[in-house]
Image (cartoon, coloured by chain):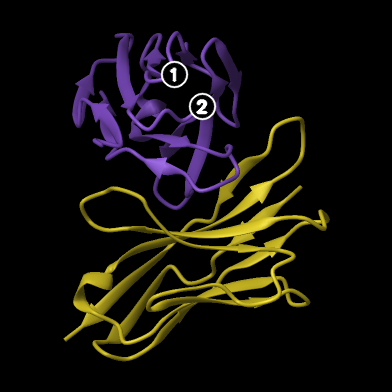
Chain colours: A yellow, B purple
């Protein structure tokens, strides 16, 4: 069965520094997709970035980039130039392809605190 | 566009009571789903729908019912609330499918005493 692992329950970073949030996955499906979502203290889930397994380049969206290492089965989120507003919970998710309908499975999340 | 809306934001129920969590989206998305979020467990899929009139079970469906009579609305019914259903509930919709980018509602925090 597919699985998503986020091993960092919490992280601290200084404002303006870069931070990497880890995500590893396990799947035997050659076609899969990986997502990162942000959940601020207000509670809503915000889509950040997506990487397809066949994408040749690492995905980037503004200050967010995805360090996709297929052989290592990792899809780490890199946030450059951290801002106080980046303090939030971050979830990695993967497209699950077992069964008739594809679904998303989520990791347990990493709580990021940006310090001034 | 309001996106995905959920009501109520907060609810306290007694064990055995029933209630319906409302979810609506105005983006004309075919795919809608309900997740629950518990501490240390990420989000888990409860039920989902691939279009009006079509629903199916997710990972943790027991104790919940859904229906999808219109494209816009996807209510989640708790039949007989239990303390184990204390959680934060998120409704989500998607244009392309359940395994693509999801647009989430603001969540409903439910406490069952």
Residue depicted at x 81% and y 53%: A29
Q: Position of residue B84 (x, y in %)?
A: 41, 28
Q: Position of residue B72 (x, y in %)?
A: 38, 20
Farthest residue in the left direction? A116
Q: Residues within 10 Å of mark 2 (few under 14, many from 20)?
A: some
Side of B10 relative to B51 (left or right):
left
Q: Which residue is mark 2?
A: B30
Host chain of mark 2: B
Please tell me which residue lies in front, A116 or B24.
Answer: B24
Residue topped by disc 1: B71
Q: Nearer the viewer, residue A6 or B24?
A: B24
- State which quarter of the image contains the N terminus of chain B: top left
Residue B76 placement: quadrant: top left
Task: Please say if B9 is above or below A81.
Answer: above
Q: Residues within 10 Å of mark 1 (few under 14, many from 20)?
A: many
Quadrant placement of the C terminus of chain B: top left
Residue A94, percent from left and from top: 62, 54
Chain containing mark 1: B
Q: Earlier in the sequence, mark 2 or mark 1?
A: 2
Distance (Cα) linking label 2 and label 1? 6 Å
- Disc number placed over residue B93 in the picture, else none: none
Specify the quadrant of the image occupied by residue A30: bottom right
Q: Is residue B97 above or below residue A12?
A: above
* Residue B81 falls left or right of residue A60: left
Image position, residue A32 (x, y; %): 71, 55
> Dot 1 lies on which element?
loop
Q: Contact, CB < 8 Å: mark 2 with mark 1?
A: yes
- Asked if residue A30 is positioned above or below residue B12 in the image, the reply reads below
Q: Is residue B105 above or below residue A33?
A: above
Q: Residue at x 38, y 10 (%)?
A: B80
Residue drawn at the location 49% of the way across and 56% of the way down: A108
């Amino acid at each position: 069965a597919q699985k998503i692992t986020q091993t960092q329950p919490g992280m601290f970073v200084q404002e303006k520094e870069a931070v990497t949030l880890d995500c590893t996955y396990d799947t035997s499906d050659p076609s899969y997709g990986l997502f990162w979502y942000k959940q601020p203290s207000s509670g809503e889930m915000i889509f950040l970035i997506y990487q397809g397994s066949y994408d040749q380049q690492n995905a980037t969206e503004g200050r967010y980039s995805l360090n996709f290492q297929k052989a290592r089965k990792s899809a780490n989120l890199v946030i450059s130039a951290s801002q106080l507003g980046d303090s939030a919970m971050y979830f990695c998710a993967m497209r699950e392809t077992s069964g008739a309908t594809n679904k998303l499975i989520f990791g347990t999340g990493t709580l990021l605190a940006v310090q001034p | 566009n309001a996106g995905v809306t959920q009501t109520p934001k907060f609810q306290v129920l007694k064990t055995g009571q029933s209630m319906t969590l409302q979810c609506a989206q105005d983006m004309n998305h075919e795919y809608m789903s309900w997740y629950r979020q518990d501490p240390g467990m990420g989000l888990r899929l409860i039920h989902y729908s691939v279009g009006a009139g079509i629903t199916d079970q997710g990972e943790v469906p027991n104790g919940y019912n859904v229906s999808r009579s219109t494209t816009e609305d996807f209510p989640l019914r708790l039949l007989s609330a239990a303390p184990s259903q204390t959680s934060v509930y998120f409704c989500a919709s998607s244009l392309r499918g359940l395994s693509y980018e999801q647009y989430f509602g603001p969540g409903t925090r439910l406490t069952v005493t």
